Amino acid sequence: MDPDSVRAAERVPHGGTTDRAVLDLSANTNPETPPETESVYRAALAEADRYPDDGYDEFRTAAADFVGCRPEQMVPTPGGLAAIRLAIQTTVRQGDTVAVPYPSFGEYAREVRLQGAEPVLVPQDEILNTDPTDHAMVVVCTPNNPTGECPPREDLVALADRCADADTTLLADEAFLGYTDQRSLAGHDAVVVARSLTKLFGLPGLRAGYAVATGEDRDALDTARRAWNLGTPAAAVGAHCLRQTGFVESTRETVVRERTRLREALSPEFDVSPSDAPFLLVDCGDRDVDALLDRARESGVVFRDARTFRGLDSHVRIAVKDRDATDRALAALDGAA
């Protein structure tokens, strides 16, 4: 990380609220957690009086089974963003360029700048056509946040192959891929995958995630990660959650049903982007976005002000959760159409 760049950088806005009196639809997290999560946490907490086993064998095995690769390719991290930072720190040098999509997760460009490198901003719907030759890294978000589209896997593999030919790393942020049935890019020689337990398993405060890579990239990630970088409770709960295939299938079914219901109810009064993710990007058109957000908050619902994403000037993002959340989101928007 470049010290001068750190001093010139700023933090970026995110969704999420600590106010438990409102329904938070600004953060795209599952309202449910897998069964027995609390008991696993309590048992692990009793073991937290010692340093964790820095090998994290159980966590690595569960994560490898979840994405379909080998345990030795897994690198545990305290959340998906930590995996993103680790990938950029071990790949990008001062003065390099990195192709970054927009509108998309604001931390990509920030992390590149913290390294003293330059993010080259590419429209999200053009990022798969990027020529990787002159970049140290290309970043993709699948499905993309905040637009929700997930490119076909064959198109992603084609980009990964071009990155391999150019000796460029493809960083694939798969934070929301678990909501789909699309197979991970984990295991491709040119790819570093970043994943978390935040969204799918409803545990944003646990801070558990992982990176997946092969060869020298994997070795660099595992060497650079901090010792004991995953707490004992996070590692135990993470391994437990990653084995809950029934929970994952049930969550996917709920999100597909409620996303369809929400989208159909909002259309055609609002322009709603197609989505494969647990959220919808809604163009408010000529409506007063601030007034819409304020009215929703007064009704006890918080939406994400998507105008904080580059290139969006009249949008909100609405998380898709369960039936009650959909009902309350629609009630909060009643009259805004």
Image (cartoon, grey):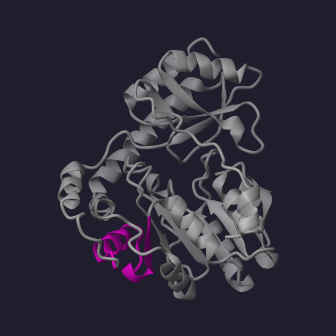
Visible residue check, residue 99: no
Is 55 on the left-hand or right-hand side of 300? left
Visible residue check, residue 135: yes
**Coordinates of residue 127 in the picture (x, y in percent):** 74, 61
Is 203 on the left-hand or right-hand side of 8? left
**Coordinates of residue 54 in the picture (x, y in percent):** 34, 77
Instruction: Identify the residue shown where x is 40% and y is 47%.
Output: 252
**Coordinates of residue 168 in the picture (x, y in percent):** 70, 79
**Residue 311 within the segment the image draws in magenta:** no
- Of all residues, the one furthest to the bottom in this rendering is 216
Range covered by the magenta-colored residues:
55-77
- Position of the N terminus, as image quadrant, is bottom right
Q: Is residue 88 above or below residue 20?
A: below
Q: Quadrant of residue 9?
A: bottom right
Instruction: Identify the residue shown where x is 66% and y is 49%.
Output: 11
Q: Is residue 46 above or below residue 61?
A: above
Is 35 on the left-hand or right-hand side of 212? left
- Of all residues, the one furthest to the top in this rendering is 335
**Coordinates of residue 69 in the picture (x, y in percent):** 42, 77
Total numbered labels placed on residues in the image: 0
Is 105 on the left-hand or right-hand side of 243? right
Q: Quadrant of residue 167?
A: bottom right
**Residue 75 within the segment the image draws in magenta:** yes
Q: Is residue 281 above or below residue 124?
A: above
Q: Is residue 76 above or below residue 259?
A: below
Q: Main secondary structure of the magenta part?
A: helix
- Position of the C terminus, as image quadrant, is top right
Instruction: Identify the residue shown where x is 45% and y is 41%.
Output: 256
